[in-house]
Every structure is written in C-alpha cells, then in structure tokens.
Amino acid sequence: MRHVVVDESGAGQRLDNFLVKLLKGVPKTHVYRVIRSGEVRVNKARASADTRVELGDDVRVPPIRTSSAADDRAAVPAREFATVYEDDHLIVIDKPAGVAVHGGSGVSFGVIEQLRRARPDARLLELVHRLDKETSGLLMIAKTRAALVRLQDDLRQRSGERAVGKTYAALVAGAWPANLKVIDEALHKYLGADGERRVRVVDADHDDGRRSITLVRVVQAFAAFTWLDVTIKTGRTHQIRVHLAHQGHPIAGDPKYGDFELNKALARGSAVASCRFERMFLHARALRFVHPVTDVPVALEAPLPDACMRLLHALESASASAHA
C-alpha cells in the first residue's frame, strides 16, 4: 500500500480527480473500481469518488499496475540536483528553472521521479511542497513519512515558531510602489479554455476563493523594472505570479500571466541592451523552517541563477549609463 499526504496542489479536489492525476496512465474505470471496492481510504476511512480531499489528508492507495508502468520508469533518467541541505530526514535542493517537480499535465517526469531513479535504495522520497516548472530555487523533499507530515503541518502555520518562511526574488515590469508591502487577495483556481490550470484574483467572499497573503519589499528599482523580495504567508498555486500581475507588474518572462510582448523582447535581447533573458525571473532564494525531528531552526539560501544575475547586471549598467 502507498500513502499520499495531500498538499496545496491537491487540496479541495474530488478524490477521483486527485487519483487520476496521481495515477498517470491508469484508466478512469480502474480508478472508480478501486474507490468503490473500498481499497482507497482517506484518513483510514472509506470514501466516495466525489469526496473532497483536504490539505494534510492521508490517502491510502492500493498497488496498481499498468502495462506501461515499467516502460515509464525506464524512460525516467536518473538525476541528482544541487543539494543545499541533506540529512537522514530531508533533502533541500536548488531546483533549476524549466524542470517540473513531478510528472503530469503533459510532463512525463520531474524532479521527484528523477531523484527516485537516481536513488533506488531510498526508502521514501516525497515532495514536501511544490515550485512551478518555470520557478527555480529551494525545494524540500522528505526522506521519512514523519518528516513529511511534520513539515507539511508546519507549512500550514501562518505564524508561530514552527511557521515556514519562504522568500523569493522576483523582477517585475514597471515601477513597483514602495508603499505597497502587503497583498491580501483571495485566489481561485480554474481551467482555461485551453484546458490549462490558471488562477485569478476574486472577491474575498467568493465561494471558491482562498485567502492569500503576499509580502513585498523593493530591493532595487531600475528604469523599467523593479527587483523585489517576496515572502508568502500562504502557499497557493501561482500565488506570487498572480498577485504581482494583478497589481499591474507582471514578473519578467512569466509565460502564463506576464506581458508577452515584453517577454519576447527580453528573449531577443532588445528589452535590455546586450542581454537575452529566456526564463521567468522568480527564484525561491531563502527558506526558514524548524527541523521536523531535532526542532533546531534551519535557514537556507540559494544564490540567484546566472541568467538572473546577468540581467540584473545589465539593468545596473543601463541605469549607470543613463545617469552618467
């Protein structure tokens, strides 16, 4: 039997939809069959297909084999990632941009599948939280069930000694108002016309809205961009990207919520002289948490990727030239 702890990306989903995404390649008819048989349990209890799973729920999934499972595993390349911290209980890696954290939604495999392939003797490797494919930076992976449950419980804390602190570096278009330091806007997930998952800001009393809080600090202002330090108090899907874009300052290079003409200019190297930038400028640069076993505070940092540093240097050079 396999036990899966529901995280932010799965919270609020129907059990059948949650399992279809989890069990890639398994026919829906098979998914419904194991639910009806009672083999799937939510918090040790039987559940129906329309049961809504919530953050932290323990979902027991029976062993399910498909004819393509062996082929799928063989197609996953073994890969280790830059490790920032590791002990017997967890790993923190510096995820590169452009790599999904897990397979699904048109992606055959991600960080977790590649890491499991690279460490076949690992007893357990599970994502504690997620980062968007386009986002780089610090990502926690649990090596024990106890560490996974404790860290995910800590992630739900908005304040207190055990609250997890996640800070991102973001470069946004335009001049961010220095006095805009807190964004408290509810977010709603939905499927776009293209079938892609999207998120939008909704009224606080919206039936499907979830309160989302983002703290923003200006690090450096440039002629047409602002470098921000962004800390999230809630971990909603696409939270930073949507909150910043909703304020009229989309993240540079954001392919989903960004300024597409600006993104093209950045990629061509015409937006910032002598600098081509072909990714999204969002990097999970700092992580603070209490160790799930030793209870010792841990503070980690991941330096900005080279592409982001080159763009910042180009912006600084352009600003210096303009004031010369």
Image (cartoon, helix red, strand yellow):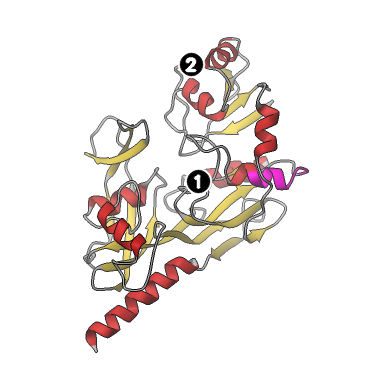
- Extent of the magenta region: 114-121
Badge 2 amino acid: Ala
Residue depicted at 43% across the width and 53% down the height: 159
In the displayed structure image, the side of residue 146 where residue 52 appears, left or right: left
Residue 174 quadrant: bottom left
What residue sits right under mark 1 in the picture?
A: 130
Residue 100, compared with residue 248, is above or below; it is above
What residue sits right under mark 2 in the picture?
A: 49
Few, some or many residues within 10 Å of mark 1 (<14, 14–19, 20+): some
Residue depicted at 49% across the width and 20% down the height: 16
In the displayed structure image, the side of residue 87 where residue 314 appears, left or right: left
Q: Earlier in the sequence, mark 2 or mark 1?
A: 2
Q: Secondary structure at mark 2?
A: loop
Image x and y of residue 190, in percent:
33, 32
Badge 1 amino acid: Arg
Image x and y of residue 248, in percent:
21, 55
